Amino acid sequence: MITWREFRSYLGELVGGHPFYNPKVKEALDRRSDVFISIYEENDKLEKRIKELESLPAFVPITTAEAVGHILKELKKDKSPGSFYDAYHANISIAFYDECLKQKVKIPRKNIIKLTNAAATRFLDLWTSQVK
């Protein structure tokens, strides 16, 4: 990474001498110095974050069965609104609902909603009942 001093020196070489001896360059640097400093500060922050991320342990691959096991444990653990369980329930319920509409089931929509919610609850309860 280049320092501010090195940058000014490099700029001076480009314009033929020290940048502060050239009034136009000095004026531009005075206006832009805050921008350059903040860019370098952000760069330092990013480099530190990259080093932090590089120091984390490597990704450990798991099998699909292990991943599903983790999902089931999470589903069983928390059934509150906004939880993972709630999200799965909504997706399963709407899939049933859409299929009922697609098949033109002759049941009032209110009842379809009750049935699809019950089906989603039953499915999730049966699926998570295997988890200890």
Image (cartoon, rainbow, N blue to C red):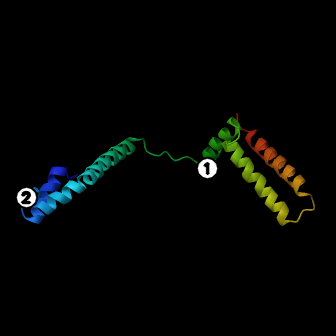
Q: CA distance from mark 1 to mark 2?
A: 67 Å
Residue type for callout 2: Tyr
- Residue that mark 2 sits on: 21
Q: Mark 1 or mark 2: which is in front?
A: 2
Q: Secondary structure at mark 1?
A: helix
Residue matched to label 1: 64
> Tag 2's secondary structure?
helix
Instruction: Identify the residue at image location x=78%, y=41%.
Output: 125
Q: Residues within 10 Å of mark 1 (few under 14, many from 20)?
A: few
Q: Is residue 127 above or below residue 8?
A: above
Q: Is residue 59 above or below residue 14?
A: above
Residue 128 location in percent, x, y?
A: 73, 41
N-terminal label among 1 and 2: 2
Residue at (36%, 44%) from the top-left corner? 49
Q: Which mark is residue 74?
A: none
Which picture quadrant has residue 130?
A: top right
Q: In the rendered view, does 82 fall on the left or right side of 58? A: right
Left or right: where 130 falls relative to 4? right
* Residue at (74, 50) in percent of width and height: 90
Residue type, label 1: Thr
Q: Residue furthest top?
A: 132
Picture coordinates of residue 62, whole percent (x, y): 55, 46
Residue at 61% over, 44% down: 66
Residue 69 point in image, percent of width and height: 65, 42
Please tell me which residue lies in front, 32 or 10. 32
